[in-house]
Structures are given as structure tokens and as C-alpha cells.
Image (cartoon, rainbow, N blue to C red):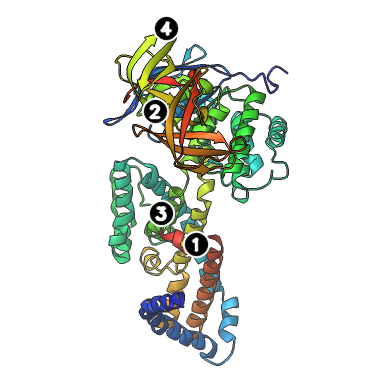
Amino acid sequence: MIGKTITSRKILLLAPLLLFLGLAYVVPFLGVVRWSFTMPEVGLGQYRALMTDPLVQSVFIRTLRICLIVTAAVLVTAYAIAYVWVRGSSVQRMLAEFCILVPFWISVLTRAFGWLAMLSNRGLINTWLQSAGVISEPLALARNELGVIIGMTHFLIPFAVFPIASAMRSIDERVLLAARGMGASRTRIFWTVFVPLTYGGLIGAALIVFVFALGFFVTPAILGGGRSVMVAELVYLRIFQSPDWGLGAAISVVLVLFIGALLALMRRFIKPAHLIG
Amino acid sequence: MPQSMQPGDAKAAEIKAVSIGKTFGAFHALKNLSLDIGRGEFLTLLGPSGSGKTTFLMILAGFTAPTTGRLVMDGKDITDVPAEDRSYGMVFQGYALFPHLTVEQNIAFPLKVRGRSSADVKRKVGEMVERVGLIGHEKKLPAKLSGGQQQRVALARALVFEPSVLLLDEPFSALDKNLREMMQQEVKRLHQETGTTFVFVTHDQSEALALSSRVAIFNHGELLQVGKPQDVYERPSNRFVAEFLGEINLLPLDTVELNGETAAGKFEDRTIVLNKSITLAGKKAVAAVRPEHMFISASPQTSDCNAITCRVEGATYFGASTKYHLRTRSGTSLAVSMPTASTSPIAPQSDVWVSWPVHQGFLLPDGG
């Protein structure tokens, strides 16, 4: 009886959020689902188009490719930052915290334009390299897939640091001491003991980053310069620029189902609490 | 095969610790400690928590560097040799098994580090699995094993590469009483079979006495006494050792006189004769006698015995033995432990004689 009252009270605490999610996401999304089956006419026509339209296909493939590359780049960088954050000296820890938290405080738009200022043809990097005589023609760093990957990687690193650092923190120090005592070198301990013990965090981080990346809109729109459109931008273009609401809606539904499947997969590997750290 | 070694002739090492000191900030964890660890012996470091015994073990292992002093192994100075190059076996508190590796892979780890051939690794791991009784569990992860089985994996992993020294840090503290006794016998057997030098840390005095060839007693960062279990139990050099190793009755003595091998002093109106195991600076001293060395009777035992009169205040039944709580005429409380089977119950509030053989009592400085 007592347990039941506490549970219902807890649900009461969650109620505003559930109500908001229902009104702001679930109900409108049901509308989007309806569009995908009814616009311009009732039927599966938009899903058939989605399967055959070469433009949609190429956008989906590009999105998957960018997301995979970004996920790999984020995991490597975030692993290094998390390592310093968890096991570094106090100064190193502070630096790592700075690297993790500052991006959080700056809006995604500001950061995308910041990267544009760095990477564009007349941006900082190209101007420096040209004035130093390293290159004669500017490198194509922005307004293409590379720019999108750089911007997205930078944005997503903090989200991967937390689950990885959480996994690193839960390693029993004595296990590492034991490996040392048995004569293992530091490199060997890192690769055969330390890294395998953080696999859970790595899987969680990979899924979070990948799922986030799938829905990216602002960064690819700015740093891709319209030349490397990703799925979210395609939805925007279909709905706001060409009045093709049905196809935009069908793409949205497929994206949401795909992300839902990934999240379900994530739950099998890792407890949500571990992701926060 | 020169490198294949039969159990029993392992290359046990001897270690000399010379004036080892360790400070953490202003805290002196170890004070000027010198100790010789003999080849192939089973030495237990015993003391309460914070006594410095674990710090000393970590210094032996090479995980902690001493602030002062030297460590010498087989005549070679190893003070600055890092842990990974000392190659000692170590069993940690909580076992510290690799949670992502199976039993087999855990035991194989130190062999793989040493670059042994896979056939050699397979054979050694198989031998070790058999020796610690883990057949059938080779493919399991540590989380699937019971506490005792995890303990066996930790022992196997620490011994499989035939280390010259095995260090054990409170390995049984997480086990229940029966399992603990079983594992104690197991460790004792492994010590006899391997012939390796064992250094064992515990805060459990009965464990220390049961296992060791010698016991080193620590308190407040100092080494108080080292000796065979029987010596430190029956001839403690000071009150801390006497009281830490087991319950003891202390009788304050007046006018102690030393006569060659024995000492005599007055307790109430009786003369107490004791072994003179220590040199006494002052005249103040106490007679110390273990409860199981005393016995209760209706009349005083006089042949080579001391006897005092007491009143019985109560009794506690422990199964194999019964402990009587008594008080002397001047108010000193005493405990006497007697085998339950060989005594008839003694009524509370009766006046009795408590006696003990002269050679079982010893002299300790008062208050120190």
C-alpha cells in the first residue's frame, strides 16, 4: 500500500513532463503520421516513393555515412578527454572539464558559425596556411561533408564523454594494480584490461551520438552549405520549400522508427542511468 | 626442461626490510621498520586497521614507495624496482579478478604477459585449475562464481607464474566462518606445495596464529614483536601484543623480585611466581595469564602452581568451552575458560580457588 502511494506521487511529479511530451510531441507526430498516409491521396504512395526516389535514397545513405564517421571520430576524441578527466592530475582534470562544459554553454548556431569562420575558404585556417605559404589554393574545409563532420563531431563530444567517463570511474583500481603486479606493461593494461572494462560506456556513447547525429539539422545546414543535405534538412526542404508534405512526413516517420529501434537496442546494452555518469 | 619447475622447489626469495619509514603528509604510517622475511616462510603481518601492516605490504609489492629505508631481496637492492618488474604474486582484498575475463583467461593473464607459448599457457592453467579445485568452472566469468571460488581463482592467478613471493592482503575478510577456515587450510597447503615465501596481512589474530610460521605484530606504524605463533601468544613482549592476540587476565603486582629465571611478586596476600621473559625497568608490573591456562577448584593447587581466591560472578557457555567470570577480593575481574566436558558446572556466587601453572604466567610492564 505504501509503495503504491509513493509510486503514484512520483508519477504526479512526472505529470507536467508527460503532459508536455504528449501535447508537444506525441499528438503532433500522430498528425505527421496521418499526413504520410493521406497526402496528397490516401495510400502507401509516399512510402513507395521513399523506397524508389534516388534523391531520398542518396540523402539517407549520406546521412548514415556522416553519422558513422562522426560517431567514430567522437568516440576516439571523447575517450581521450574522458581518460584525462577521470585519471589525470588536478590541472588536467580542470582542463578536461573546460573542454567538456564550455561547448555546452554556447548555442549550436554560434558554434556552427564559429566553425564556418575557421574553415571557410577565406576563414582563419586557410588564410593562415596561405600566408605561411603552405598552400596556394584554399582547402575545401567547409560547405561540404568534411565541414559537416567537423562541426557535428565537436558538438557531440560532450555527450559521449559522460557515459565513457562513468564506465572508467567504475573500474576497480585494484584490478589495474593486480595487472601491474603480474608484470603487465602500461600499454598492455590499457588495451587488455582498461579498454575492455569500458565497452559498456563505449556502446552507450556510440548509440547516443549516432541517434543524435541522425536528427542533426542546424550544423549540416550551415557547414554543408546545401551541398551535403542530411535527412532532417531534407524533411525541412520537403515541407517548407517544395509543398510535398506527404513525402516529408513519410521520411520523418521512417527516421523516428529507426531511432526508436536504436534506442530499444541501447536499452538492452546499458542502463539509462549509466549514460548520465 | 630447465625452466619447467616442479611444485615444491620454486625459487622462494628472502627479503630484508631495513629501516623502512613511510609518511603521508604529517602522518607516520610506518616508523623505522626493520624485518627479515625468510626464504619460504609464511609470515603474517597482524595488527588493527591503521597499524601500517597494509602499507608495509604495498611497499613490499612495489605499489608504494617508502619515504626512507631500503628493501633488499636475495642480496639485491629492490627499493626502486617498480611493481611490474618485481613479479610477486598478489592476492588482493576483494580478489581484484578481471571481470571481463573467464576463470581460464584470468589465470592465463600473467603467463601471457610473460610471453609463454600458448601450449605452455594451456598446460599451466590446466594444472592450476586442477590444483585449486576449479575444474568445470574454466569458462565462467568471475561474477558467476561464489566468494570461495573467486578466492581460488585469485590464488591460482597469483601462483601460476611461480612467483618467488606471494603477498596476500586480507584475502578472507569477505568470507563466512566455515569457508574462511576451508580457505585457510587451502592456503596452508598451497604454501607447503609451492615452497614460496608467503607474506599475509590480516587483522584476525586466530587466523594469524593458525597459518603462520611467524607473526609480526604492528601497531601505530611500529613493529612490536616478531616470532613464532606460540612465542608471541605465550611470551608477548608487551601489553598490546598480549591483549591483541587474545583475551588475557592482568593482575597488578606489588614488590616484584627477580630471581634468575623467575620473578615473584605479591598479589593481594599471595606470592605469585612467574617466568621472567622481559627485563623490567621499574618495580611496577602485572602478572599476565591467558584464561585457558587457569583452572577453578575448591582448594588451592600448590605443586608448581599459583593460586588466588575469587568469587564466581557468572558463566558463558561456548559449546566446547565455558567461560567463567570471576572477581578477586580486591576487585580485579578475571576470566577463566575451561573445557565444558571435563568440568561440572560451578554455581554463581560461590568462593573458589583459581590456579595456574607457574610456567604459564608471565610478567609484563605495568601500563605499557
Amino acid carrying mark 1 in the image: Lys
Amino acid carrying mark 3 in the image: Val
Residue underneath mark 4: B260
Residue depicted at 38% across the width and 66% down the height: A225
Residue depicted at 50% across the width and 36% down the height: B170
In the rendered image, residue B104, in percent from the top left (x then y), is placed at: 66, 40
Residue B250 circle label: 2
Q: Establish whether labels 2 and 3 are both on one chain.
A: no
Which is nearer the eye, A198 or A105? A198
In this orientation, does residue B59 appear? no
Chain assignment, label 3: A
Identify the element where label 1 is drawn.
Answer: loop
Q: Establish whether labels 1 and 2 are both on one chain.
A: no
Residue A161 circle label: 3
The nearer-to-camera label among 2 and 3 is 2
Identify the element where label 3 is drawn.
Answer: helix
Tell me the crowding category of disc 2: few under 14, some 14 to 19, or many 20 or more residues within 10 angstroms, Cα based: many
Identify the element where label 4 is drawn.
Answer: loop
In the rendered image, residue A136, in percent from the top left (x then y), is placed at: 35, 47
Residue depicted at 51% across the width and 88% down the height: A34
Chain assignment, label 1: A
Chain assignment, label 2: B
The nearer-to-camera label among 1 and 2 is 2
- Looking at marks 3 and 1 on the same chain, the residue that comes earlier in the sequence is marked by 3
Residue underneath mark 1: A271
